[in-house]
Image (tube, helix red, strand yellow):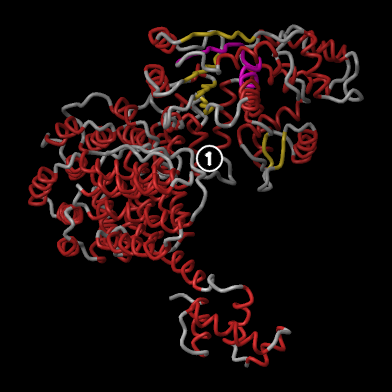
Amino acid sequence: MEFVGRERHVVAVRRAARFGSDLSVTFVDGAMGIGKTALVRTALSALHSDDAAALAPRIEWISAHPDDRAATRPIDIVSHDGRPTVIVVDDVQWADDPLLDQLESWIAGFGAPLSLIVIHRPIGVPLRLLAAARRSGARLDRIQVGPLDSAAVEALITDAIDDDILAAEGVPAIVEHADGNPLFVTLLTQVWRAIPDADRFASTLKGVRLGDLPSAHGALRTDLDRLAPGEREVLRAMAFSGTFRLATICRLSGMTADDVTQSLAILRARELLVVRADGETVIAHPLIRAAAYRSIPLDHRRTQHRLLLDELDGLSAVQRAENLALLGDELTATELDEICATAATRIATDPDDVVRWTAATLHLSSERRDVLRARALLASGEPAGALRGLGEPRHDESVVVTAERARALYALGRIDDLADAASDRRRRSRETTVLHAQGLVAKDDWRGAEALLVEAAAEDLEVEFVLDAFRMLRAVEAGDVDAARAALPSADRIAAVGERDVEAALLALVWIAGATVQLDLPHESSIAISVGGRLARAAGDTAVLAQLSAFRAIAAVARGEHSTARAEITDARRYARLSRDPDARQLTAAARRLHRLVTGEPNTDTWLPEHVARSAWVRRLTHPILLVTAVHERRPAPSDPGAWHRSVWNGLHFAAGAYARAAEGKPRDAARMLAAARAATSASDVPYHAACVDYLESELLFVSGELDEAARRIEAARDSFERVQFHGLQHAAELRAALIDERHRSDELSVLTEREREVARFVAEGSSNKEIAALLSISVRTVEEHVSRVRTKLGLTSRAAVGSALARARSPR
């Protein structure tokens, strides 16, 4: 359908997005279905087509609707390079507090020219957002999107339906009742398709002005009410069941199988029902399903849910939970227990389900429900919501609730508050103690963490496993490989932790995975990651699932198992997006960058900007990977995590400059900047700092044809990476060395002319000079001269050595 009737509004939106100032906030308001989103999309599409690619701003879309998973995206939008950015927030009237907090922070300071376009209903703009925009001094604009005029509505109708289907009298009838709303135009056009008669059409709508209805569901309900009774009942039954099962639909609708089948065919013909790729028949659109559901009186809805729950064919646990949640305040304590049982299995895979289901049970008191809801909110990256849901600490609070509170405090970075919660002996548990230790390690307080774990291990033998894992990681951090291997728990002991299902051991397994990946202990790391993954899925800990998948990916890259690495990175990305955990995000970014460096795959990630990890040991583990890959991709290195890395950070910025100068054909400038990079890293006594520069310099030498020096540099880098146990970068250096070697071998024959190479090949095959002369139609004397020149150029003392030289050039050294 062509976009019509909004030319003036398109110009206004484009003007708002052209950065007349560093910050502008534009409010685009209009009734539901009036075409606000389509307007902005059209305007920004035209903006991109007019601007050169280098000048075009970044455009990011955010849906504020709570059912839209894109609402988790805003945290990924950051200013990398000062590039102008347009952020569009659709349906802001649905925005929750975290999204509004993020929008206010961008308004307060984004770090680049920002045009924020907010789409909302006429009375749906959050007042706090409007106040923040006014306080900021931003340029404010308002674009009111009103009804289309009659000509535009007519254009929409005639574009949507062929003239032979839509009678001429239908156009004015639809224009009269649509109130200029494009959504209503679409709905009324569907009505006219079924009732192509002006009198019947008007009778169907008599007494109902579509513009007076509060939502699209009302408009759709008008469309549904004109269905025959049997069709309407089947559609309503489908709204409950989700998919078509004949016995279920018969029971819910009270109709015979023949009548249901007949109505089903009509609903398919009218495109209200469609067949999915998996063969299931479903309602064509969620709005239609919602409209059919809402057209049923509340009491009857609950009766239908009860019928569906008693369905003899049975429902899956998830379907039962969905239906139970829709019973609302009719839920019993037993049904709440059933919801909780299903919710406990869904936290890791779809925490939003759990949040939605448990929201319907808040009229009942349940500690189990409160803990599951808090854990689901944590799994979906909402620790503040989890903390609010648990309420204020109580003197009679159980250790389970206190442990969940501690998890939320850790996720929020409130380590001091976590320490207070863990210090209360009445509610202290193994999990709160381990979380406290994790918080201390994150702050690099290794002594404090060890003292805490030693004290706890004296009272609880299970903590000894955590203490051993801690000592192993600390030894790796100190570069003491022997001590790290000595502290490593046996494979049987790691596996036994999983058998005992010790939830507090999750952190220990993350530490073991991180240490064993660095020590290149594939058997132990595989067991730790497998056991940890099983425990994390049972606990619904998406942050740990992301970290473990990232570790497995890094190990797979080091072993050259690229398909495994790719699959693990996919899992890590999914869980890191859900949890929004900074350690998980940085580990995932490092794994993806390392995989791309080794395989040469293009950068297709837009969601992996650098995030400063919460834990210092994670920053140190990932930083060399992120630094090397950042410079390798000729873009700024990630933010410096501390003074300890400042020298290499500056050095690699110089190396990036050398890349640019070499690409511009300025070898002297490139050499000067490489010297500056060397000087910047010389102050560091950390082996991999110089190795990073060696790696990058070898590439420049390779491009410039200095293969011998390039080979020396890459071998030095490879040896350094091996010594410090960075096996992923070691593998990357080995691949680079092989490429240099291949070029070196091919260049050995480059000194020969084409004819000399032909003669050399025949000599290598054992042909005599006379045979070569006949094959090439030249004289024997000429062949003798070619053979002599080949031996001289290649430094060979005999004819037999020619064959050896060619064989050497064709095979790896």
- Of residues 369 and 716, the one nearer the viewer is 716
Q: Residue at x 20, y 62 (%)?
A: 488
Pinpoint residue 143: horizontal percent, then vertical percent.
Answer: 59, 9
Residue carrying label 1: 319
Tell me the element at label 1.
helix
Residue 329, given in percent of the width and then of the height, sits at 45, 24
Q: Nearer the viewer, residue 183 or 136?
A: 136
Foreground of the two, 203 or 579: 579
Vertical placement of residue 715 versus 143, above or below:
below
Residue at horizontal 69 percent and vertical 31 percent from the top? 235
Residue at horizontal 65%, vertical 17%? 35
Boundaries of the magenta span: 23-40
Question: Residue 537, can we see it?
Answer: no
Question: At which x and y percent is residue 261?
Answer: 77, 40
Rendered position, 223 above or below 580? above
On screen, residue 672 versus residue 317, left or right, reads left
Q: Is residue 378 left or right of residue 95?
A: left
Q: Is residue 344 visible?
A: yes
Give amino acid for label 1. Gln
Residue 264: quadrant of the picture: top right
Q: Residue 575 is drawn in which quadrant?
A: top left
Q: Is 492 on the left-hand or right-hand side of 44?
A: left
Inspect the magenta stretch and tell me whether residue 375 lies in it.
no
Where residue 649 sits in the image (x, y, percent)?
29, 42
